[in-house]
Image (cartoon, rainbow, N blue to C red):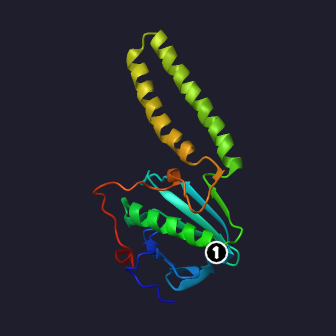
């Protein structure tokens, strides 16, 4: 199967540094994919489930993921970042956003009963949220104790750690709240923002 590059709704990324790039194309009737010598297609009307989420990694804290479950093919994953070097993952915010929005539109237009969900699975999200709330309370209480005992340097360190913890973990739980969505109005919290002046890489550079 030929997947020409440079098309409006082509998308490619490298899920690992040494592996072949994962290439996707939105054809008229199906989502087509290729990775090295392996290729396939999933008709829009045969896609039974889609999940959009925020999935940061150690080397790339601003990373989004789309998961697609076709009825007659293995689960497909589409990430908003691509491995560029041993020490760097490149953000593909613009390409990913446009591709995922159009993919949702085409699957929705196929008029199949498809499940559209965002965030983490419920059985993972809510226990994690409870742990996050408990840890936040514990760190805040520790900071108060430090102030009461006059350990102002320690209190400052705890406050800085607390702010970073709340910002990172809080953002993760806010974006990954489990919910259903309409394919014609994809929630902004599970899509990267387009930043002015942010350079992205076209798919032909990843082949």
Residue 126 vs residue 182, the one in the foreground:
182
Q: Residue at x 56, y 30 (%)?
A: 136
Residue shown at 71% from the left, 48% from the top? 123
- Secondary structure beneath disc 1? loop
The answer to whether residue 55 of the structure is visible from this angle is: no
Check the picture and name the quadrant holding the C terminus: bottom left
Residue furthest to the left: 197
135 left or right of 171 in image: right
Front-most of residues 81 and 175: 175
Residue 59: x and y in percent read: 42, 54
Residue in the picture at 34% in, 65% down: 200
* Residue 19 coordinates in the image, percent (x, y): 47, 74
Q: Nearer the viewer, residue 127 or 41?
A: 41
Residue on which the image places disc 1: 110
Q: Nearer the viewer, residue 199 or 160?
A: 199
Looking at the picture, how far across and down is residue 18, in whole percent? 43, 72
Q: Is residue 22 found left or right of 49 in the rendered image?
A: left
Q: Residue 106 location in percent, x, y?
A: 57, 72
């Amino acid at each position: 199967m030929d997947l020409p590059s440079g098309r409006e709704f082509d998308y490619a990324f490298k899920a690992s540094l040494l592996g072949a790039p994962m290439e996707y194309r939105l054809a008229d009737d199906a989502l087509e994919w290729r990775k090295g010598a392996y290729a396939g297609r999933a008709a829009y009307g045969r896609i039974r489930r889609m999940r959009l989420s925020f999935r940061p990694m150690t080397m790339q804290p601003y990373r989004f993921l789309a998961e697609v479950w076709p009825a007659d093919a293995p689960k497909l994953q589409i990430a908003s970042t691509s491995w560029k070097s041993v020490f760097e993952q490149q953000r593909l915010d613009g390409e990913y956003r446009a591709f995922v929005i159009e993919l949702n539109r085409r699957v929705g237009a196929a008029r199949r009963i498809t499940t559209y969900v965002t965030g983490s699975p419920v059985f993972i999200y809510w226990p994690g949220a409870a742990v996050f709330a408990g840890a936040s309370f514990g760190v805040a209480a520790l900071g108060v104790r430090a102030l009461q005992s006059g350990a102002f340097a320690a209190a400052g360190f705890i406050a800085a750690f607390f702010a970073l913890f709340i910002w990172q973990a809080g953002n993760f739980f806010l974006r990954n709240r489990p919910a259903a969505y309409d394919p014609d109005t994809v929630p902004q919290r599970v899509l990267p923002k387009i930043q002015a002046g942010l350079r992205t890489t076209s798919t032909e550079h990843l082949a």
